[in-house]
Image (cartoon, rainbow, N blue to C red):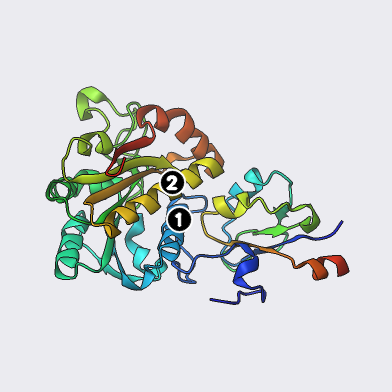
Amino acid sequence: MKKRFEVLINGEHCKACGVCLEFCPQDVLGVSEQRNKAGFYPVEVKKPEECTGCGHCALMCPDACIEIYRVPMEESVQS
Amino acid sequence: MSETRAGHTEAEALYHRPAGLTDVQMRYCPGCTHGTAHKLIAEVLEELDIIERTVAVATVGCSVYAYEYFNTDAVQAAHGRGPAVATGIKRASPETIVFTYQGDGDLAAIGLSEVIHSAQRGEKMTVMFINNAVFGMTRGQMAPTTLVGQKTTTTPLGRDPEMSGMPMMICEMLSTNPGVAYLARETMIDPKTVRSAKRSIRKAFQTQIDGAGFSLVELISTCPAWWHKTPLEAMQWVRDEMLVQYPLGVFVDYDG
């Protein structure tokens, strides 16, 4: 499946509160196995092709760690 | 900010970190909706294009570091005196957009007279009132807004109305005040309420830009650390308990 949206997570600012995991309807996100500098296991993108760009994760993230971008048409065809 | 971290253009962004926030990591506890409130205010400042002429007034409480997070000029006021400092800024420089960011321990306890008199005078400023029913910074003591029966470090058996009275309803109290132009109570516990909160925050700043009078938005927030709950349990507790005591809604709206 083509990747239509790019979800960027600032893993160093993430405090692993888990709010985005709860509100993502597509289960795009998961928890990293590596700790960040603050000692949290940050959230990372596990299934980028499932993202529908609803933006609920970014809307709910209390630390503004999540950014979502539309992947331009030609790039998404190549990938 | 025409190009973002990953080299995408602004037009491709469905969501990006708002320009009203600095790149500093917020020191709030994981899952605390203080961060969500900061984010919404920063988005509104960016959308209304008023970042350059805004002064934030941070007060005492968990929000004491707000001046590091907002990408605006900022003043740190003494405990509860945010509206007094904001009055001075607004009167000295009427073109400036000024807002205070206060918790319930700050606004409803020590700073109650300041906010009432600012509303009474109809000062053209915006107050962001974060109500999480405890004093968060000092480890969860009872605040004026603590619910009946709620256990805190100073009410270990639950708040007793015989002893400490009933929770203070700031919006209801200010709604009869003729100087108030916009007054709303919102929360941030799911995407719908976050969007609604943003609309109210935007309206509050628009009220100030229009020079209509005093505006205040009460944001029912979570305090996972001192409610001793996970972030998601805290959001559920807001839905089940807080919103029963503090119904959401727009109390005063100057243009309809």
Relative image position of residue B206 (x, y in whole percent): 33, 55
Name the amino acid, label 2: Ala
Relative image position of residue B247 (x, y in whole percent): 37, 31
Residue B125 vertical position relative to residue B173 in the rendered view, above or below: below
Chain containing mark 2:
B
Numbered badge on residue B40: 1
**Is residue B10 visible from the viewing direction of this image?**
yes
Numbered badge on residue B197: 2
Name the amino acid, label 1: Leu
The quarter of the rendered structure image containing the C terminus of chain B is: top left
Q: Secondary structure at mark 2?
A: helix
Residue at the far front in the pictured view: B255
In space, the residues marked 2 and 1 are separated at their CA atoms by: 8 Å
- Residue nearest the viewer, comparing B181 with A37: B181
Left or right, residue A36 beside residue B100? right
Left or right, residue A32 beside residue B125? right
- Residue nearest the viewer, comparing B28 with B154: B28
- Residue nearest the viewer, comparing B49 with B131: B49
Relative image position of residue B170 (x, y in whole percent): 25, 38
Relative image position of residue B15 (x, y in whole percent): 59, 60
Q: Are marks 2 and 1 in contact (CB under 8 Å)?
A: yes
